[in-house]
Image (spheres, rainbow, N blue to C red):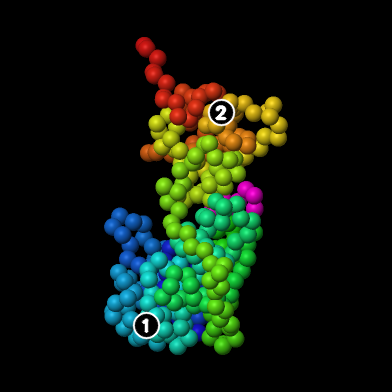
Amino acid sequence: MRIAIIGQQAFGASVLEAFIKRGDEIAGVFCAPEKAGAKPDPLRLAAEKEGLKVFQFPSLKGEPAKQALKQLDVELGVMAYVLQFAPQDFVNIPKHGMIQYHPSLLPLYRGPSSINWPIIKGDRQTGLTIFRPDDGLDEGPVILQKTAAIGPDDTLGSVYFNHLFPLGVEAMLEAADLVVAGKHQEIVQDENRASYEGWCKDKEAQINWHAHIDQIYNLIRGCDPAPGAWTTIGGIKVRIYETRKHPVRRFEDVRGKPGEICAIGEKGASIIVQGGQVELIKVKPEGGAKMSAAEFFTKIGFDIGNALTDPLPLPEAA
C-alpha cells in the first residue's frame, strides 16, 4: 500500500521501518520540527536515511501541511506517536483516512501520560489502541486493541519497551491491512467508561514519604525512567529509580518514623514509610550521575537514623 507516516521519536521510526521491511511504499513522512538544542528526531533520521520526503510543519492545521499530504496521493495515513493536533480536514485526505496509536485501552487513560498513570494507580493491566483520530483528544472510534499485563515490579520503561512498543508496531501493521481491505470495525468509545489524565511531570512525581508503601512504590516505578520520581535529601533534589518494597507484617517490626533511614547495605538503603520500608537502589542527585543509594548517603554523610529532611552534616574542622 502507499502510505504517509505522521509521528516522531523511536516509535515513529520503528513503525516506518516495519512498513518498509514488508514492502509498503512510503510516499512521505511528517514529523514535528525539533526544538533548538534538542536531539535529532529518530523518525526524521530514519526517513532521510531511506531517501524519503520529509515534512516538518510547525502545525498540521495550516494549508501547507494539507497541500503536501494531498500531493502525496496516499491510501492511508499512519499516525505513530503524534503530539501535534491533526484536524479532520487533514486526517480525511488519504483515500482510507488515518489510523492512530495510543498506549492505553481507550477510553481509559486518554491523555499524554497514559503509560505512567496505570502503573502509579496500581493497575495490573494496560494495553494499546489503534483508533480513528477525530477532533477530540483520543476520542475516535476504536479499530484494534491489544492488552498487556503490568507486573508487580514493572516500571514505565519495562511496560513500554517490553510490551507496548513492540505490540504497537505490530498492531499498526495489522490495523492498516484491515482498514485498506475494508475488513475493519469501528467501535465508538463508551463515554461512561472514559477517563482523562494530564501530563505526569515534576509536580506529580514528588514523593511523599508519609504516604503508604504501595503509593510510594507505584509512583517511583510509574515514573521510571521519566520524569523520575524525586525527593529532597539533605536539601538536595534527588531522583529515585530502582527500588524494592518490604512490607511489615507485625507491629514489633516497625522501627522509627516515616522518612528515616533504617538500613544501609552494600548498594541499597531502606527508608521507613507507612506499611513497611522502601529500599532505594539507584538514585540521581541533581546535576550528578546515577549512583547506588548507599554510595550517595555515604557521600553526603547520612547514616541510619537520619531523616531525609535533615540538613547535611557540617564538615569536620581541620
The circle on residue 89 is 1
Whether residue 1 is in magenta: the answer is no
In the image, 195: left or right of 4?
Answer: right
Which residue is found at the position 59% from the left and 36% from the top?
274
Q: Viewer-proximal residue, 224 or 141?
A: 141
Whether residue 113 can be seen here = yes
CA neighbours of label 1 inside 10 A, class few (<14), some (14 to 19), many (20+): few
Which residue is found at the position 33% from the left and 81% from the top?
66
Q: Position of residue 207 (x, y in %)?
A: 49, 41
Whether residue 153 is in magenta: the answer is yes
Whether residue 128 can be seen here = no
Q: Nearer the viewer, mark 2 or mark 1?
A: 2
Secondary structure beneath disc 2? Answer: loop
Q: Quadrant of residue 276?
A: top right
Q: Position of residue 264 (x, y in %)?
A: 57, 27
Q: Position of residue 23 (x, y in %)?
A: 52, 80
Residue on which the image places disc 2: 257
Secondary structure beneath disc 1? Answer: helix
Which residue is found at the position 52% from the left and 63% from the top?
195
Q: Are marks 2 and 1 in contact (CB under 8 Å)?
A: no
Which residue is found at the position 44% from the left and 26% from the top?
310
